[in-house]
């Protein structure tokens, strides 16, 4: 299997006043294509820092990071921006959709920063991505006319539109109620089934049971890296949830 | 990142906040409109003064006796007799930059016809005088050269004098009026010129052959003044030089001697008068320019607030692949769009306001193309200048912090 992510002894130190805080103290793992990995850890475990490094928003103090075979550590800001644009799809806890903007325009946004993509290609890809997340009938809905679940699905479509090497989800179900969370989780499992590589950062242990692999962080170190052989089906869980009265 | 996409993004962002965009624009609109209107008013009054001066003869040169001392006492110009008819003839025949030349002697007194009389001034001149001062004969004729040789008792009268002496609307041509005790037959009536820029009635005069005024009224042989006109206003300097050397020669002045005459030109007067209106224009433009500056600061303020308010949006754009320079360009384009659109509206409004001033207050206006181009350019520069700092701030944001900004 193709290696999508390879971390080699990643360390990240922050200087706060006179003190040096070690957020990551030597993290090593590889993720191959088609894995659905949950990264767990309590607050302060370094999972946010790890996410920033995985997302090429931050660079490690030492250690090497290869994304889809490309070494990231020596890249400058602009090249990392381009790398994010082509290889990574972000899904945030609070959706981060542009206000007063239609679903399709929100999804088009990453392609706006890709000069090789024409306006027509952009529209076609955005529509395809929205259809893939089941919002084909809501292309022209503005972000303030949608529910939380719909907004998060628009955000997932936005993450898919550039056909990324890896999708990084940061507490992607954190703002949603249980039912909607499982709907979104169903979507992630579908993407996984299609062969997408997904890294899902969360502190909710339930979610780990729906992924193929679970990495646990504690105090900046990997304390657990378990393959899940008994993946639960989110769709079945969703169906078993009590149906709401209204 | 191509520019078309950046324009789309910037337009979209402005469209999301139309009312705010309009308010920001208002500062620029008012600033640009004020600059254009004020300059139009300033330039309008300058041009109207220039037009009045050129009515009087913008290339006119006046030579007075003067500068002479007797026993250390400087004499009044009226008492000096240094200008002679020979000087006039020499200027007429030798000075190449001078087109018309006329002597001038004048006397104030009462003009009388029948039961009516009016105080006025009689100017003794030759036929060139009418060309120099741009007087036209409305009715009748100018006196002839023969009238000058014979010191004939004939005259031309201005409209104001006609109105006073012939209130019943009689035809004044051929009538004999008296100036003091001298009878003068009216041979022509001058076309009205109205008041000049200094409030003098240019129609309140009698024009007679200079010989008549010299011999019959003043009993003098010298000239009080010589007036001439240069080839054109731009040749005034050269004409003055020629006249100076001719007069110094004629008056046998040695090098180092002071001139016994003084030369003034209408050009000096004109530049003095227009410098006043120029100053007014500068003051008006400065006030208007300040309002443009305030408008620019308004842009900066709003863009600054906008950057803070849209920190998360900026964070998102960066995390999905926008480079710092993309963000910088987006915000710069936004502020330029505001200022350019505001500038365009301001130009239209400013020109409209200038015409309104012209129509309602019947104030002279003149819109110079450069003032429109300049104020438009200034407001574009304003957009870049005042948009730069907020855009820099936006571009310098850390995406990690910006995306989680509350």
Image (cartoon, coloured by chain):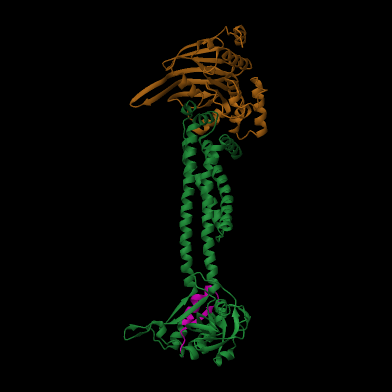
User: How far across and down, in percent of the image, does residue A97 sit?
Assistant: 56, 26
Q: Quadrant of residue B6?
A: top right
Q: Who is closer to the viewer here, B361 or B291?
A: B361
Q: Which residue occupies the extreme front position in the image? A: B115
Q: Residue at x 54, y 65 (%)?
A: B48
Q: Is residue A59 visible?
A: yes
**Image position of B348 with respect to B194: above or below:** above
User: How far across and down, in percent of the image, does residue A223 sit?
Assistant: 45, 12
**The N terminus of chain B, quarter of image:** top right
Q: Is residue B127 visible?
A: no
Q: Which residues are magenta?
A: B221-243
Q: Is residue B239 magenta?
A: yes
Q: Is residue B149 magenta?
A: no
User: How far across and down, in percent of the image, does residue A14 sit?
Assistant: 39, 25
Number of marks: 0
**Image position of B81 with respect to B51: above or below:** below
> Which one of the lettered chains is coloured orange?
A
Q: Horizontal placement of B193 versus A19: left or right?
A: right
> Which one of the lettered chains is coloured green?
B
Q: Horizontal placement of B212 versus A107: left or right?
A: left
Q: Horizontal placement of B62 versus A148: left or right?
A: left
Q: Quadrant of residue B71?
A: bottom left
């Amino acid at each position: 299997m193709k290696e999508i992510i390879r971390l080699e002894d990643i360390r990240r130190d922050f200087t706060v006043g006179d003190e040096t805080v070690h957020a990551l103290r030597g993290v090593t793992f590889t993720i191959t294509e088609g894995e659905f990995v949950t990264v767990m850890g309590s607050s302060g475990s370094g999972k946010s820092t790890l996410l920033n490094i995985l997302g090429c928003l931050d660079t490690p103090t030492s250690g090497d990071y290869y994304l889809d075979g490309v070494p990231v550590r020596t890249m400058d800001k602009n090249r990392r921006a381009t790398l994010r644009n082509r290889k990574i799809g972000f899904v945030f806890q609070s959706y981060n959709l542009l206000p007063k903007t239609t679903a399709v325009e929100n999804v088009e946004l990453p392609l706006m920063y890709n000069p090789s993509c024409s306006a027509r290609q952009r529209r076609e890809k955005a529509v395809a991505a929205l259809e893939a997340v089941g919002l084909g009938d809501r292309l022209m809905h503005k972000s303030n006319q949608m529910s939380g679940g719909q907004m998060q699905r628009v955000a997932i479509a936005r993450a898919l539109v550039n056909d990324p090497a890896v999708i990084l989800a940061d507490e992607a179900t954190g703002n949603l109620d249980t039912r909607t969370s499982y709907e979104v989780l169903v979507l992630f499992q579908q993407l996984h089934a299609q062969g997408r590589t997904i890294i899902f950062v969360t502190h909710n242990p339930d979610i780990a049971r729906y992924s193929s692999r679970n990495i646990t962080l504690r105090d900046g170190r990997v304390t657990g890296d378990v393959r899940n052989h008994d993946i639960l089906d989110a769709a079945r869980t969703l169906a078993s949830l009590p149906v709401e009265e209204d | 990142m191509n520019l078309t996409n950046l324009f789309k993004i910037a337009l979209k962002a402005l469209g999301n906040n139309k009312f705010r965009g309009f308010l920001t624009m208002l500062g620029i609109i008012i600033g640009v409109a004020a600059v254009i209107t004020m300059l139009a008013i300033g330039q309008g009054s300058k041009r109207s003064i220039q037009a009045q001066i050129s009515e009087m003869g913008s290339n006119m040169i006046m030579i007075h006796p003067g500068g002479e001392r007797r026993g250390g006492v400087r004499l009044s110009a009226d008492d000096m007799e240094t200008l002679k008819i020979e000087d006039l003839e020499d200027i007429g025949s030798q000075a190449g930059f001078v087109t018309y030349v006329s002597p001038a002697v004048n006397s104030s007194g009462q003009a009388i016809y029948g039961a009516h009389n009016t105080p006025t001034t009689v100017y003794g001149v030759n036929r060139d005088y009418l060309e120099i001062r741009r007087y036209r004969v409305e009715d009748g004729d100018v006196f002839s050269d023969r009238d000058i040789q014979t010191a004939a008792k004939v005259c031309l009268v201005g409209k104001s004098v006609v109105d006073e002496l012939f209130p019943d609307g009689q035809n004044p041509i051929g009538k004999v009026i008296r100036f003091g005790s001298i009878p003068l037959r009216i041979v022509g009536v001058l076309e009205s010129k109205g008041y000049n820029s200094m409030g003098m009635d240019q129609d309140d005069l009698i024009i007679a052959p200079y010989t008549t005024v010299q011999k019959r009224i003043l009993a003098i042989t010298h000239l009080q003044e010589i007036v001439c006109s240069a080839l054109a206003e731009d040749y005034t300097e050269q004409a003055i030089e020629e006249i100076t050397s001719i007069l110094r020669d004629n008056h046998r002045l040695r090098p180092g001697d002071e001139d016994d005459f003084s030369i003034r030109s209408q050009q000096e007067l004109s530049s003095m008068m227009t410098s006043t209106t120029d100053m007014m224009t500068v003051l008006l433009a400065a006030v208007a320019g300040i309002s443009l500056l305030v408008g620019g600061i308004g842009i900066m303020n709003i863009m600054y607030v906008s950057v803070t308010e849209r920190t998360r949006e900026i964070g998102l754009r960066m995390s999905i692949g926008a480079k710092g320079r993309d963000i910088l360009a987006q915000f710069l384009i936004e502020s330029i769009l505001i200022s350019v659109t505001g500038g365009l509206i301001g130009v239209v409004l400013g020109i409209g306001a200038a015409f309104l001033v012209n129509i309602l207050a019947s104030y002279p206006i003149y819109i110079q193309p450069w003032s429109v181009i300049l104020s438009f350019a200034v407001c574009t520069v304003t957009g870049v200048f005042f948009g730069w700092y907020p855009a820099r701030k936006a571009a310098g944001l850390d995406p990690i912090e910006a995306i989680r900004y509350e």
